[in-house]
Image (tube, grey):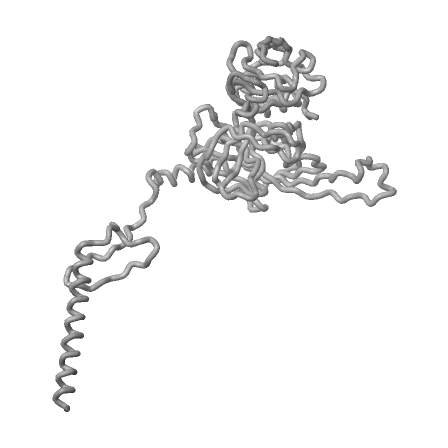
Amino acid sequence: MRLIENIKLNKAKATLALVLVLLISLSACAAQQGTGFSGPSPLTPTTTVTTSTEITPWTQQPTQEPQGYTEATQDAITAAVEKVAPAVVFIDTKYQVQTPFGFPDFYYPFFQQPEPQEGQGSGVIVDGKNGYIMTNAHVVRNAVDIRVTLPDGRSFPGKVVASDSISDIAAVKIDSTNLPEAKLGDTSNLKVGSWAIAIGNPYGFENTVTVGVVSAMNRTLTNPETGRPLQDLIQTDAAINPGNSGGALVNIKGEVIGINTAIITYAQGMGFAVDINTAKQVFNDLITKGQAIRPWIGITYSKITADTAKKLQLPDQMGVVVVEVMNGSPAQKAGVQVNDVIKAIDGTPIYQLDDLRNVIRNKNVGDQVSLTIWRNGSTLTISLKLEQMPSELP
């Protein structure tokens, strides 16, 4: 009986040994043939299998710095900051809030006088000899007291020379000379992907520097304070925060390419600056004429979609469609109507929204222009005289 049990036990051990041998052989074959992946599956952890075939375990390659981001680039960014930062100032404001119901101040024996509110922003000294500072219009709007502090600690009272809500650019002056000033660049050849350095005073942290790239050009946003479009904006992923408004967006050469103005609060890495070419033109008008000078037709317009083209029975989607004609405007005086499609101005074809704006802003106030218009299936020509755009649009 004991012998039979030993025989059965030996057979069981032999069978188990054979199964183990087969399993090891199958594992080795699978390791040699592979599984079709050149590396480990991203969904499962990497494991090490010991077989008769040697397998080199996968290892992550060392991370390399982005191409072009060299020590020389870092030195160039540092040098650019050193050029501009001394001219980026801190602007403290006190501004009067809107009185209830729009009542003037002399009614305030009957109401509680509202306390002035405080605000903070940034600015850029662009004329050190005469104490002129470029900033955002919304930074100094309704300000009753302005205090400008330089990075070197000097502080001066400031006054608003003039401001322009359409471009969100304002000119502030302090009574001082021989100040540091920033060099203003030219964005005519600025390319998407170029370095962008934001310098300002976010949340009161003076002379904060963030670095990114130019993400896009010629962006348009709706100004929440005026309801009108803010145009000619540079988009950047350099961090811009409250208090950065009015500060400098700088290229790697240490030239100001934009004035930081807006962010999209529900997004990350989406800041906007007024293109310096636009800001320079507006700023010069504010200093010399007290207001920005812009030729004006007096319409709002939109692009032509497939639905619009079908509704208006247009032969194509070329041009822009008039959606509003403002009262008293040159367009109204000349007989332009809602749903008119502007196809050309002075013979220059209008393909998209920017085309009309670019043609008009290269004209002068007082110029006579000819509009080629599609209306009710016919083409007609309307002549009008460009006027100065009002500082505050209805």
Question: Can residue 288 be spotted in the picture?
Answer: no
Nearer to me, 107 or 140: 107
Where is residue 125, by image quadrant? top right
Relative horizontal placement of residue 259, taking residue 21 as reference (left or right): right
- Report the label total: 0
Q: Position of residue 238 (x, y in %)?
A: 48, 40
Is residue 364 placed above or below 178 in the rendered structure? above
Question: Can residue 245 be spotted in the picture?
Answer: yes
Nearer to me, 377 or 214: 377
Tell me the residue at 23%/57% (across/down): 57
Relative horizontal placement of residue 103, taking residue 77 as reference (left or right): right
Nearer to me, 221 or 349: 349
Where is residue 381, by image quadrant? top right
Nearer to me, 268 or 94: 268
Query: Is the C terminus in the top left, top right, bottom left or bottom right quadrant?
Result: top right
Q: Position of residue 236 (x, y in %)?
A: 48, 36
Is residue 242 placed above or below 11 in the rendered structure? above
Query: Is the N terminus in the top left, top right, bottom left or bottom right quadrant?
Result: bottom left
Q: Position of residue 56 (x, y in %)?
A: 20, 57
Where is residue 159, by image quadrant? top right
Q: Position of residue 181 (x, y in %)?
A: 53, 31
